[in-house]
Amino acid sequence: MRHDHLLSAKQLSRGDIEAVLDRAAEMAADPGAVAEAHDDRLLGLCFFEPSTRTKMSFDAAMKRLGGDTIDMGSVESSSVKKGESLADTVRVIEGYADALVLRHPSEGSAKLASEFVDVPVLNAGDGAGQHPTQTLLDLYTIRENAGFEDLTVGIMGDLKYGRTVHSLAHALTNFDASQHFVSPESLRLPRSVRYDLHEAGAQVREHTDIEEVLETLDVLYVTRIQRERFPDENEYRQVAGEYRIDAELLESARDDLTVMHPLPRVDEIAPDVDETDHARYFEQAHNGVPVRMALLDLML
Amino acid sequence: MTDTELRVSKIENGTVIDHITGGQALNVLAILGIDGTSGEEVSVGMNVPSDRLGRKDIVKVEGRELSQNEVDVLSLIAPAATINIVRDFDVVEKHRVSRPSEVTGVLSCPNANCITTESEPVESRFEVLEEGVRCTYCDTIIRESIAAHISVE
């Protein structure tokens, strides 16, 4: 894989994806083999909004490669609080680190950052835009559990603002997957993603009811319906309850259905699903470390 | 001399932009950065009869020949426009607008959460699609009312 930056899942070919997943599988099988692979490298963690999994897994991945991380800390404690532009912030931090991981609340922020620095920028979530490293660990989980052949994926929840959804949808076009999108009308995929899927010739169907497609799915990818997006709390409650998975509902699914979620969940997956063979979301979160190790190894 | 020509007088040197989509003349002026404060001599005809378009706008700018970049950007809101370069009252060049692959610094992104709407040292940049334009930073697609997003200073 030869990219200066990883900004969007759109830039990943099938070959790129498989190179990362193959390397991740090697590293997961023998993490000791790369324990000192990047012991002279520093990764800059620039998180302008809260993150647990993404930040900690990048931190763990870099340290398991023998390198180290530097962290700009919270926005409240950084120069951003004094009004510094993103462009200036990343230009300063590139002098301290060999690569930057950026999480920022604004769409396009990673692309902007990449235009101001020479070190690699890895987009760790830009507003409602993209989250390509999450997609790589999602694909790793899908490959491990369902494989990529004749794959049918259902993606349910907040499709409008869900950056993990946007990245995953783009990436799945590389695998000729059949994609079913399930959401309230108000949270359908944005026009730009539908445009790209159409341009890629993807097999796409949109639904408002999961039961229309559940029994056909190899993978069900659930995302949180974000309460803060709704102007009316009652409107949120009405749709949120309808987009909840529980063990009873999954009785009509295939036995080998893989249920995934980028986490954190609120109430869209009932705790009783955790005890079923379908649940793969904690395994999915754990996959963040080997996948990000592989990505850093290939990009640094 | 036709009625249209009578309404808008001839210019000696400059550019005549003809066959502008009816109602878009003021947006054309915005793209060209003409707001009357710099003393340009400008004539505007709006919603005049046209055989080709039914109704059209026409803009004549004295003493200024448009750059190719300016002409290209006009295509976003006036795809049928013709550009006539005038010297000594004669049309010396006449050509149609063509669609550029990208426009920079002309449109503002309607996505309030796009990084280009914040205080960052970048110009807006849009890829020109078959139908509409797309923000290069946040991917937002504008298909309708592109002129409403013109942000030329």
Image (cartoon, coloured by chain):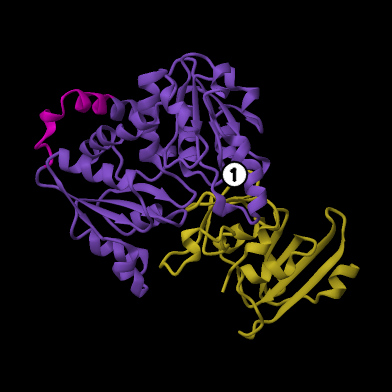
Q: Say which amino acid is labelled 1.
A: Pro
Q: Is residue B10 above or below residue A23?
A: below
Q: Quadrant of residue B41?
A: bottom right
Residues in magenta?
A: A22-38
Quarter in which the N terminus of chain A is drawn: top left
Q: Residue at x 55, y 43 (%)?
A: A225
Instruction: Identify the residue at the far right of this view.
Output: B3
Q: Residue B137's spot in the image, x, y percent?
A: 47, 53
Q: Would you say residue A294 sits in the magenta stretch? A: no
In the picture, measured across the screen, residue A7 lies left or right of residue B105, that is left
Disc 1 target residue? A190
Q: Residue B62's spot in the image, x, y percent?
A: 67, 77
Q: Residue at x 61, y 84 (%)?
A: B38
Q: Is residue A122 above or below residue B43?
A: above
Q: Residue A259's spot in the image, x, y percent?
A: 46, 26
Q: Colour of chain A?
A: purple
